[in-house]
Amino acid sequence: MNIVFAASEAAPYMKTGGLGDVAQALPLALSKYSGSRVLLFIPFYGSIKRDPAFKTELVSEFELKLGWRGQYAGLHRLVSRRRKLEVYFIDNELYFCRDRAYGYSDDGERFAFFSKAILQSLVILGEKPDIIHCNDWQTALIPTFLHAFYHDKLGTAKTVFTIHNIEYQGWVHPYFLGDVLGLPVSYDSTFKFGDQHNFMKSAILKCDALTTVSRTYAKEICYPYYAHGLHDIINDHAFKLTGIVNGIDTDVNDPATDPNVFHPYDVSNVFEEKPKNKADLQKELGLPIRPDVPLIGIVSRLVEHKGMSILCESLEKIASMDVQFAVLGTGDSEYESWLKSEAERHPDRFSVNIRFGKHLASRIYAGADIYIMPSKSEPCGLSQLLAMHYGTVPVVHETGGLKDTVAPFFPDTGEGTGFVFRGFTGPDMMDSLRSAVDLYNGDRDSWNKLVMNCMTKDVSWKLPAGEYMELYRRITNKK
Ligand code: GLC
């Protein structure tokens, strides 16, 4: 099968969040496990252009029509030895050579350009894809563009639209329809949402299959609490909606080979090596080196929907327990200062690191005993998967992908991979966290069984890639 994967970011070229990880690992897994040919398209951001690590070649240059505009488009390809996975970059310096990937007033136009340029590039390359897999609002225009402008050339392609986060939908003024998208007024109802136009709505209507990144989130987005206004549209199209839980790239994220983990380990020596990583982490963070104190970690954006309100209001309670707590991340200044002041009050308990760093992130996954993830909502979540793979026990709010990937642990049966709390409140979270700490302190055999359950859980892309392939086969009627 020929698959095109379109995303606004993909690691290692550009990453601002989980989408970047998925767009790196899923295309690779699809090509690896199914033997499909996969073409990945992302914008040629300035940072990628300037990075000598990424060798690219110019494939084509063309003018792309966006309403009345004629814009330069460059098509570049990564020079690579991978036969089954080709990476393409869409170039336009005006749109993509900026400080950040998103957050500009013309984002709508930038990603309309990107989406249409992908389809034009496929025509230029003479490709006949079976599947065009679009992700989030930035590539949500592809199904409509395909329908309106490329039907004769690429008409056999089926589109999949994956929602990684329904909060960001791509809102524009209705003038955009003719002025930028160059679409006739007959498409007005495809986009119209209140008195604005909405990219994500158009994709939900026009795609052949709609997916999101966990089964529970697929159910949740049918309700107003989670859908950010789109619940009715989702409900109308629920017949084509499925949830497929993300995986992680277990080749790259492996405690046995991760270069940032000083004492590599796997299931055979986790109980000898993980404590050494813990001691090193305590040293690095300036925390007392105590082997038996439960060390809780979190690597997260420090924002409301990641559960920072209930976490921050519980900090004094956490400080009153005999635990250590390591935080890594940036976000809203309110939560940053709340965490920092707590760390000043309890320097022997808290280490708050307001930055992002892959190296320290790996060492927290490897060195901590417990990983806390109190997200208010979580489409899938990748950190809990990383934590489990590194033998660090997750404590999570029962929502979205957290519910689908972390099963409550029962010491009697020895089954389960973590601790799950139902109500989104500080006290509920603290109950779960206390249960984790009590088990760690009081029943080391059960704890070690739990760690083993985490590490042996299959969190790779193998199963999800298979589910995507099944979906692709279903909508294309191909083998
Ligand atoms: C978004 C979601 C996150 C998900 C990721 C990849 O970042 O918030 O839950 O894991 O996308 O799908």
Image: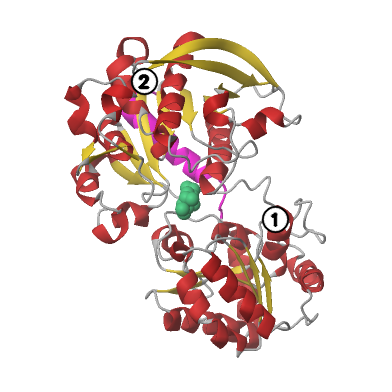
- Residue on which the image places disc 2: 157
Q: Does the magenta stretch include residue 184?
A: no
Which residues are drawn in magenta?
A: 458-479
Label 2 SS: loop
Q: What residue type is labelled 2?
A: Ala
Relative to 319, 8 lies left or right = left
Q: Which amino acid does label 1 sit on?
A: Gly
Asked whether residue 226 is in view, the answer is yes
What secondary structure characterizes most of the magenta part?
A: helix
Instruction: Give residue 388's position: percent from left, percent from top.
Output: 60, 62
**Residue depicted at x 36% and y 20%:** 157
Foreground: 99 or 101? 99
| Quadrant of the rendered image containing residue 384 | bottom right
**Residue depicted at x 76% and y 60%:** 265
Instruction: Give residue 438's position: percent from left, percent from top.
Output: 58, 86
Label 1, residues with CA under 10 Å away: few <14, some 14-19, many ≥20: few
| Quadrant of the rendered image containing residue 299 | bottom right
Task: Give the label, 2 or 1, closer to the camera.
Answer: 1
Label at residue 357: 1
